[in-house]
Image: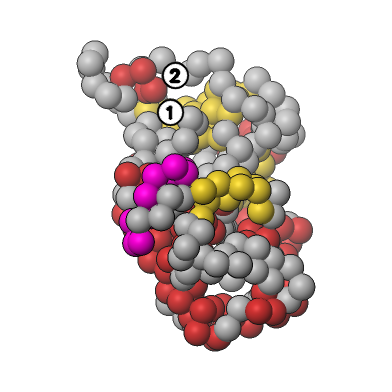
Amino acid sequence: MPELPEVETVRRGLHRLIIGRVVKAADSDNPKSFPNAKHDVEAFLIGATVSNVRRRAKVLMIDLSTDYTLVIHLKMTGQLVFVGEQRFGAGHPNDSLINHLPDKSTRVSLTFTDDTKLFFNDQRKFGWMRLMPTVEVPNIDFMKKVGPEPLEADFTPSEFAARFKRRAGTSIKAALLDQSVVAGVGNIYADESLWGAKIHPKRLVRDIKPREFALLYTDLRAVMNLAIDKGGSSNQTYINAEGEKGRYMDFARVFRREGQECPRCGTVIIKFKAAGRGTHICPHCQKL
């Protein structure tokens, strides 16, 4: 599933590419992916100008001039890909990703008045694009429950540590993955930041010392900012708004490096299950 850095990368791309464009048409092949009444689409989406693109945790919001918003959750395999006036030429590394859209995974196609397009692709059909009044977006259950954004300038180390208090009896990795504790952290950046802070993912929250929380706070923000700078962490399905893959995995210290040497101490990295997820650690640096 795309995590905060991946979704933020898509947001930045869309913000640059679609602000000011006017929606001419909207087509969908799946009501689960596009659960919107035809009347609402015609009244509040068609003819609307894109005024902003926002993100909250792993959710994207495309604000419209009609005071409606397209709220989008990419879930496991969702993609938002903008295709401009000119597609890539043959031999370009993004040729196969862009030039053949729409394809069998395309669930929603938005066409703008200049004939550029935004495709919502989703192989597993778990993601969705919901049209709703902008004022109602904060009332979505997820929005009311989600924790603070970890990269906000006013989110302090002490606030970060305090968010974990109600999860004192659970493992630190499970608490990191809980979106009501901190927004946007998934498996990749949980593993990466726990390695950076030298914390075993199965340690209970109540046993984590204040200085360790401070290290975790610092490293989590550092790896997420690096991931955004590198365009996210690509898996089989993630691409940015222009069809490009992210490069963070070239810089990963522990995630998907099982069997390789820890870049800090040289011990072989191992993989096991923690918090229900495949988990990567250095058994020397991260003792239980």
Q: Which residue is mark 1?
A: 117
Mark 1 to mark 2 CA distance (whole Å): 10 Å
* Magenta-drawn stretch, dominant element (helix, strand or loop): loop
**Residue 259 is a magenta residue:** yes
Image height check: is 273 above or below 149? Answer: above
Residues in magenta? 256-265
Residue 34 in percent (x, y) is at 67, 32
Quadrant hosting residue 288? bottom right
Residue 254 in percent (x, y) is at 43, 52
Q: Residue at x 45, y 76 (%)?
A: 215
Q: Residue at x 32, y 44 (%)?
A: 250
Mark 1 vs 2: CB contact within 8 A: yes
Mark 1 or 2, nearer chain start: 2
Residue 136 in percent (x, y) is at 70, 58
- What element does badge 2 sit on? loop
Q: Which residue is mark 2?
A: 101
**Which one is nearer the viewer's eye here, 287 or 38?**
287
**Residue 121 is a magenta residue:** no
